[in-house]
Image (spheres, rainbow, N blue to C red):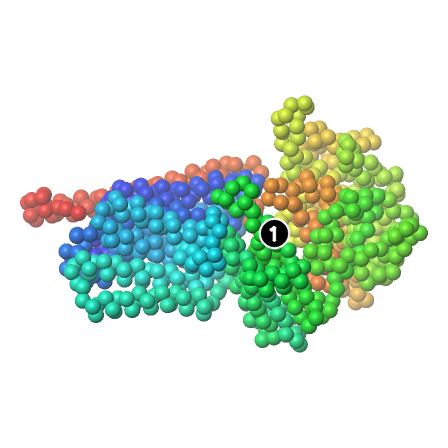
Amino acid sequence: MRVLFRRYLFGLCIRPSVFVSSALFVLYAVLRFFFGQQFFSDTGTTELHRFFSAIPYAAVLYVPVLAAAVPSGQSSYSLPFPAAVIPLAKILALLAAASGALLLTCVVPLTVQFFGDVELASVCCAYAGLLLYLAAAVSLCVFLSELIASAGVAFFVSAAVLAAVCGAHLAASYARLSPWTAACCRAISFAWHFDAAGKGILDTRDIGFYLAAIVFFWLATIAVMEYRRGRRGLLFWKKLALLAAACLLCAVDASRLYARIDVSDAKTFTVTAYSRSLLDELEEPLSITYYRSGVLTSLYPQVRDVDDFLRAYAACSTRISYELADPSRQHVEQRLAQAGIEGRQLKTEGQGADAYMTVYSAVALSYLDRTEIIPFVLGTSSLEYDLTGRVQHLVRGTIRAVQVLSGNGLELSDYYRYVCPYLESQGFTVLQSSLPSRRNEAGHENVFTLYDSVPVLLLGSSALEGEDADAFAYFIQKGGKLVVATQPYTVNLFEDWSVQRQAGLLDAGSGDSMVAMLRQFGILFKDTLSADSFCFLLALQSGTSAKTEYVGYSLWPQLPRQEYAPEGMTMFWPCAIDVDDDAAAGAGFSASAVLLTSPSAWQEPPAGDSFITNPFAASKSAPDGAETGSFPVCVSLAPIRAGGASLAPSVYVLGDQYAACDFGIAYSSGSSGLDMRSLDFIVDCLLMVSGNQELVSLKHKGIRNTSLYKVSGDDFLPAARRALFFDCVIIIVILSFLYILAALRRRRYNEKTICKTGNPAVLSD
């Protein structure tokens, strides 16, 4: 084995084609990540899952090139070694060469580490999965190279077969397949079985599949070689057939009896202690049913994680039963209709421009006579939050209710249309109530103070009257929960975006009664607009031309990722907030900053009696004498106990009434979908004031900081160029150095051989 391994590995090391293909393989993986995923852009991320997922497809041509560089056919049959040793030595030599090239791709995680945070455990897990993938791919190519006499034909067949087994799970997106056929395609897909490892999950099913594939193709290669050598005894073939059958049975068993180890830092795929403690409260059986269309498992490999997580969730209690249901069956369709679950339309590729199919991926939870529905789920990022929140409602009977009020004259049904549906999708029940000043109007009989235990979400305050502000002050003092998004001015949203300051904004008083009332709790709004060079890029048309110009609008600052905004947030003409600790303490509260702007922010003063809000004329940097730094744009109030300790916050004040408005959501949204980060933050605030801090932690469980925060500003572009240059140079230099070493060793070997024999003709590959 050692002699053959060294011979095959040395043969690989002296072939220029091996080093050229290795360089192309590594450079493709590196450049595809940095340019294909736009790493050095505003959307750059340290998330490496897509980088690792691309490597199996890059190996479709690379592994057959390596296999073609190893002698096969008659040159293998004539070797005085057992048939089991020869292909195994080839597999190990090819795997060593491929692993060397794979090792060079580590320049990507190392480079990313200089720009942001990288999970080391997840990276190691991904590389372990790639090693198993390469071993299986090498075994397949070795088998085909022995099966096909022509090296050229073997290369093309190997590349075609490897491409087919890598993308087999995608067949359902191009053709309508039966569930059994789609399951078979997934089962044989090499890339499908790598998906979990690329996300930081060690899955014994995938490990078992790769090991079974390696042994199976090794045995198949032995069979080909023995047949060509003339060994055709019945006993030998029976033994070989039994071993091959054992491999297939091991692969099947691995899919039925398995374990999953989540090595990621966030433990996204692990049930938390809070959920386990809640499930311990179950007194009656809880049934969980996952309605999943079979085609989804081929289009979105991550839905397998949903099934696995639900099984792990159900395993936390003996009172939980779990079922995976196929919506295509007739009796299941009836259950879906009874539960009110509707399918989603999904466009399929390769079947025409108007080819759509209806798919389901819904979770139903039933406990006693109550049922909760998660209407559509494709991943596990917020699955535990959705499950635990609904289980909490079923088991404890807790109802998360909220009163939503508009205080700036903008009707909820016209200008805040996303707010109530989004709250309901997060498990809240929206109650109908009104302001005291509107109690006599039709449909506004129930004043919000009647539901003193139900939190209030107030959007804007410019239209409030004095009695409304007094009611809110009384509501807060009596322990009411309030989340208010406001600022001491309004903006003409639908014309020139001019800022309409309330009377007395720049004076000691304020024309906004709510803003004046908040002063007694130590919350003071600044008399300026908060601006930031780290801001939203606004697409504008210059003049009458059709040319689109992107302008950084400093009055729409982008909040950086932080504890209470893990994905950042866009704000619209926000107002910074000062805190008067003495006034807050005098009212029985402690005030704390919740959201902060970036350090590059400044306070934009008015130009005379108004602010300059024209995107082309607005300041791009801090004016002379302007206050600069990081400013609070959201503040919380927490009641103080008699001993001086603070309780959980009961009031949140956000200095932006337009972040949750249709106007703000529409502008900040992109091609990837609606930007709901502001509504997410409001949901967090409502959960916090309702005493559901654990649910907030679950909601943010799968979110980590993937921004390129370590390098910013003027240093970013030079750092990006240096990183890319050194990565490419290091790869080429290392491969060139290794090839030179191998060439020099071959030259010394040839010189010694000629000196001993005196005949150059004895030299051969």
- The x and y percentages for residue 250 are 37, 67
Q: Is residue 485 left or right of residue 72?
A: right
Residue under label 1 = 344
Q: Is residue 17 left or right of residue 509?
A: left
**Which residue shows up at 41% across the image and 66% down it?**
252
The answer to which of 608 and 364 lies nearer the viewer is 364
Q: Quadrant of residue 85?
A: bottom left
Q: In the orientation shown, which residue stands out farthest toward the right?
A: 440
- The x and y percentages for residue 2 are 22, 59
The answer to which of 90 and 76 lies nearer the viewer is 76
**Which residue shows up at 55% across the image and 57% down it?**
293
The answer to which of 662 and 737 lies nearer the viewer is 662
Q: Is residue 528 left or right of residue 353?
A: right
Residue 89 can be seen in this image = no
**Which residue shows up at 49% across the image and 51% down it?**
176
**Which residue shows up at 80% across the image and 57% down it?**
431
